Amino acid sequence: MIAHHYGTDSIPRKDVKPGTFIKYKDRTYLASANVSNGLHVNTVYEKTMIKSDKIEVYLNQYGKPLMRNGDI
């Protein structure tokens, strides 16, 4: 669970960058690699690949995708 976020938004999978916090199946994941056949995401306990075209991402205070290292 992320303590501070400003909602979510669905964006195209091709626009997701590594380090972005993802909401998928009511869980929070961290994007690790965006390849042509899917988006690799992980948590501390599991790794998975998302193949859908739209990805739900958490937003920061500026309305941009929330990144692990705080990038805007």
Image (cartoon, rainbow, N blue to C red):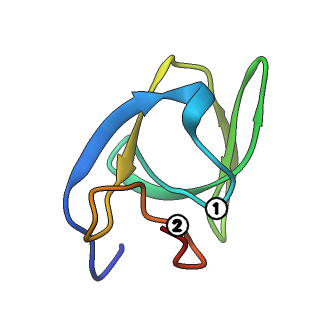
Could you tell me residue 71's position as x and y percent?
Answer: 55, 72
Q: Quadrant of the N terminus?
A: bottom left
Q: Are marks 2 and 1 in contact (CB under 8 Å)?
A: yes
User: Where is 5 relative to 17, above or below?
Assistant: below
Q: Residue at x 60, y 78 (%)?
A: 69
Quarter occupied by residue 14:
top right
Q: Position of residue 22 (x, y in %)?
A: 46, 51
Label 2 to label 1: alpha-carbon separation: 5 Å
Q: Is residue 70 left or right of residue 60?
A: right
Q: Secondary structure at mark 2?
A: loop
Give the residue displayed 64% in from the left and 48% down from the top: 17
Q: Residues within 10 Å of mark 2 (few under 14, many from 20)?
A: many
List x then y, in percent, for residue 13. 55, 28
Please name the residue shown 28% across and 41% down the image: 9
* Residue underneath mark 2: 67
Q: Tell me the quarter of the picture where residue 15 sits.
A: top right
Residue type of the residue flagged with mark 1: Gly
The mark tally for this picture is: 2
> Quick check: 17 left or right of 23?
right
Circle nearer the N terminus (2, 1): 1
Q: Where 42 sits versus 71, above or below?
A: above
Q: Residues within 10 Å of mark 1 (few under 14, many from 20)?
A: some
2 to 32, vertically: above or below: below
State the residue position of label 1: 19
Q: Is residue 11 left or right of residue 13?
A: left
Amino acid of disc 2: Met
